[in-house]
Structure formats: structure tokens, C-alpha cells
Image (cartoon, rainbow, N blue to C red):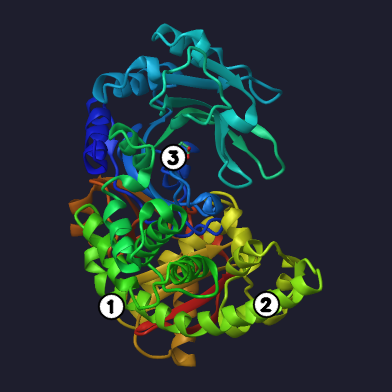
Amino acid sequence: MKAIDLKEVYLKFFESKGHKRIPSSSLIPENDPTVLFTTAGMHPLVPFLMGEKHPLGTRLTSVQKCLRTGDIDEVGDEVHHTFFEMLGNWSLGDYFKKESIEFSFEFLTKVLKIDISRLAVTCFEGDEDAQKDMEAFNAWKSLGISEDRIAFLPKKDNWWGPAGDSGPCGPDTEIFYWASSLDVPKVYDPKDKRWVEIWNNVFMQYNKSKDGVFTLLQQKNVDTGLGVERVSALLQGFSDNYLTERFKPIIDLVCDLSNKKYEDYKKEMRIVADHIRSSVFVLGDPRGISPSNVDQGYILRRFIRRVIRVLYLLDVKDSVLSLLASKVIDIYGVEYPELNERKEFILNEIKLEEEKFSKTLVVGTREFERIAENMIKFNQKVFTKAFLLFSTYGFPLEMTKEMAMEKGLEVDVDKFNKEMEKHQELSRVGAEKKFKGGLSDSSEITTKYHSATHILGEALRRVLDKNIVQKGSNITPERLRFDFNFNRKLTDEEKKAIEDEVNRVISLGLEVDKKEMKLDEALNSGAQAEFGNRYPEVVSVYSMGDYSKEICMGPHVDNVSKLGHFRILKEESSASGIRRIKAILE
Ligand code: SER
């Protein structure tokens, strides 16, 4: 079954079980200081898993765009990707283990018609935090899965989350499919890689605090995730995801451009196909960003530069990235109209980055080879010039590491980091740390910054120009950052007037009110909506007295008087026609 069909069949099935479809959220989470990208379908649902009421009810289903760099070193094999699409269904305090397992089983065996003899499952074996999951075990057994095909495994295998160091999590049950053409063994062996994981049902009942303590959540949730690429490939009889319609046209193009065969260069061609797809989705997101040396922009830069280098290794030295990117847009444009809407931006940014890097790749590689050969001659193993390659030739650390590894050398990462920190206020290390960090931080201070952001947006409209809209927002526990359309620098008087306006509103002590309504009703009522965002049919609208009204997921303070004093730290240009304000509450 092709990916596009699998997605529809899945959503329809869960709709028939009372679930409401929610649109994919942005790949780039907003107002979340702890992660750079959306890494799972549950990510946009964190406040609702924690107990907040979702406007569409307690049963939800979606196809979420996800991006993970944790597996980047595995990309090149048959099944790993950085960008991928995740199917998911959620119970927010509604059904629990038994029904969730029954839904999954019915979907796999009745809808996808997978033979039960090809399935095996794992359940949590229990420890001091949660007991052995007999409930899941019994549910599987009663559906006809034999005990030989059920394994109990420890936390490292059968516990999901939190995605970072804190947040919702719980034991899970994972479903495996026998992907080999050889006979299915009677007994399931968790170490046998021919059993491929296809679905993860997480029973999210716990919250893990930053200091590692597990407490019960207000409600028992279910969070499941099923990888579109993998399941669709298996249903088409491929063990290699890159042979499906999602990747084949890209691989074919790389074969044509390089005059080489896929069989001979599978790893390289898969990296190209994977990374160009991720780059297009990051650039093409409604909140898409450009390559840079920090945060998401740095990850994007790494993807694009790695593609250029790998193509170079395949002897493709011409400028071909826009051709490859266009192919990705052709494949996904119907399902993700934002890619077509932002096509010019995507192709332009890719071309600029290609022009910038192609120039230095050749000289930088020569420099690397020279240093590496000298080291090998003198039997040295630790490569210390990664920062030089970064600062002079724009080689991302990871690329130098990869090149060093190919020569049997190891990069001195500490030295690189020290030199980098000296060089930059916002170092790459910070970005990586942040990327590995936790889920949506709903702490008191970030909640306050979130509410202050709404007031600031309205204050800008009232003080500067009524056509101002939010073009981007980012919140950390230290400050808020707000991007908006305006085409010149603000004067000191204007900045002061904006500060005064925000502080005036704070002193009014307005109540913050949340209402759920149909999307068109919300838009007709004049609620602000973020440009380019796709919303579900029913949305939450947050109002602060009569002052501001915005479609938003929350959370917010209950009264604006809690915000304290607002002060602008900096006003600067963010992109052409876009200004950026950084401000604090004190
Ligand atoms: N959150 C779980 C996962 O990512 C299930 O969706 O695997």
C-alpha cells in the first residue's frame, strides 16, 4: 500500500472509532525552549496529556511531520530517516490498554490484512517505578497472540518518554512484523533484527520530573506511533524503504546525475535522498527557516552540506540540489501544499547554500587531506583542526568527524567546543543540548512569557501598525523573542511606547479567558491566527479582557497582573521586512 493511501486508511479507521483528525503541527515547535524539532506525534499534545482539555475531545488521530537527528548516523541503512511521517492515535483520559491494543490489532489484521502469524509483541517487564504489564500481556493473549510471541523487556526497551529530561511517559507495548521472506520462527527473539518494529503503543500515565521522580498524571492516556515509511514499504513487500514511491524518484535522479548504480552506492544515495527531503521539509514548513550556525538553521545547514559532500563523493560536481529538491516537492506537494507555496524560497535557499559551500568544499577537503596525511605519517590519531575547518571552510563538526572516521582518525571534540564557545555567544553545543532536551516547558515563567507575547502582539498593532502579525515566536525561561512584519528600525520613542503599552495592560489586571469554538467562528470573531498555520476544525481562543484575542494552544496565566514588569532588551532586523524584539519580564 502506497504511503498516501496508508495515511488515509489509518485516519479513517480511527475516525470510525470516534477519533477526531488533527492536522500535522509545524515541524518547528513554537514557544518550546527545549526542543528544536517536533520529534513525535505526541509532541504538540503535551499540555493535553498533562490534563488540559482538548477542543476536539478525548480521542484524536493525526499524521505528524517529525524530524529526529538522534538516528542520523544510522541513515544510510534500509529503514532509518531523519524526517519521517508518524501516524498516531491518542486517548486523553479515555480508553486505555485493552482498547488501544484491540484497535491496533484490528487495524493490522483486518484493515491491512497482515497475517497474525507474522506478528510478535513486547510488554514492560516491571521495575520499581511501574509494575509488570500483565494487562497488556492478557490483552494480546486474548486476541490470539501466542505466549511464544510475547516478550517482557525492561525500561530501556519498553518505556517511552519523556522525550527530554521531563514530561509525560509510561510503559509501552511494541508490535513487530516478520519482514524476512524466510519462514517465520515459532518463537519471537527480540535480538533478531528481521523482526521489525512497526507500532508503539505508549500508556502515558506518568510524569517524570527533572530530578527523575515519577508521579501519576491526572489521567491515563494512550499515545501511539506508527512510521508511515516503514509500514508502507513492508506492505509493498520492500524491506528497503528507499525503494518505495517516496524515495525511488530521488534515487533514480541521483543515479542519472552520477551515472552510477543504486546497488553499488546504496548508503551514499540513501543519505542524499534522506537529507534533501529533510531540508525541503524544514525550509518548506510554514515556520521554515534558513541555514545558519544556530539551532534549527544549523541542523539544516548540516543536512545540505552533507548532501553536497556525498554528491561530490559520487562525482556529481555540478549544482544539482534544486533539481533534487524539486523532486521532493513533486512527491509531497499534494499532501503538503506549503511546499508548493514556499517553492521559490526553498529552491532559492538551497541554491544559496550550495553556492556558498561548493566553493569551500574543495579547498577545505584538500586542507583536511593534507593535515590527515601528515598525521597518519606521524602515527597521530587525534585530529585537532576541526575548528579551523569550520571557521575557514564552513565544515560542520559532524562532517569533519565523518571525514576523520573514514581515515581512522578521531576528532578532538572538546577542543572544537572550547574554540567555538570562545568564538560565538550562542554556540552549536548549546543548540545540540537544546535539541536533546525535553518537551514543552510549561513552567510558570514560560507560561508568563507566552501570555506576554499575546499582549506584545496587540501592543505592536496599536502603537505601530494595525497590520502587524506574528511571524515567529520563541520562548525560553530567560526571555521572549517575537518576530513581526515591519520594514524599518524602531525609534527609541516607539520602543518606550510599546513597553508602556504592555505594562499598562498588565496593570489593568485583565482575566485570561479560554473558549473553544469552530475555526471559522474564531476567525470571524477577529481572533488573531498565525499566518500560514493550519488549524483543526475546533480551536481554543484565548482572550485577555477586550484587549487581545488569539487562536492558541496555551497554556496561559489566568490573570495578566501576574506578569510583572515588561522590558524590551533588543530590537533588530530578523529578515527582510521582519523585525525581532527580545524582551523580559522582571
Ligand atoms: N511517542 C511514541 C513514539 O514516538 C509513540 O508515538 O514512539
Q: Residue 466: which numbered mark, if any?
A: 1
Residue placed most toward the observer, 325 or 455: 325
* Identity, as a three-letter code, of the amino acid under mark 2: Phe
* Identity, as a three-letter code, of the amino acid under mark 1: Lys
Does 186 sit above or below residue 504? Answer: above
**Which residue in the structure is indicated by mark 3?**
48
* Identity, as a three-letter code, of the amino acid under mark 3: Phe
**Which residue in the structure is indicated by mark 2?**
387
The alpha-carbon separation of the residues under discs 3 and 2 comes to: 43 Å
| Of the two numbered discs 3 and 2 in the rendering, the one whose residue sits closer to the viewer | 2
Q: Which class describes the residues within 10 Å of circle 3: few (<14), some (14-19), or many (20+)?
A: many
The answer to whether the residue bearing label 2 lies less than 8 angstroms from the nearest atom of ligand 1 is no
* Label whose residue precedes the other's in the sequence (1 or 3): 3
x, y (%) of residue 366? 59, 81
Callout 1: SS: loop
Residue 460 appearing in the image: no
Does 46 sit above or below residue 507? Answer: above
Residue found 32% across the figure and 17% down from its top: 115
x, y (%) of residue 92? 41, 31
Residue placed most toward the observer, 62 or 151: 151
x, y (%) of residue 540? 33, 49
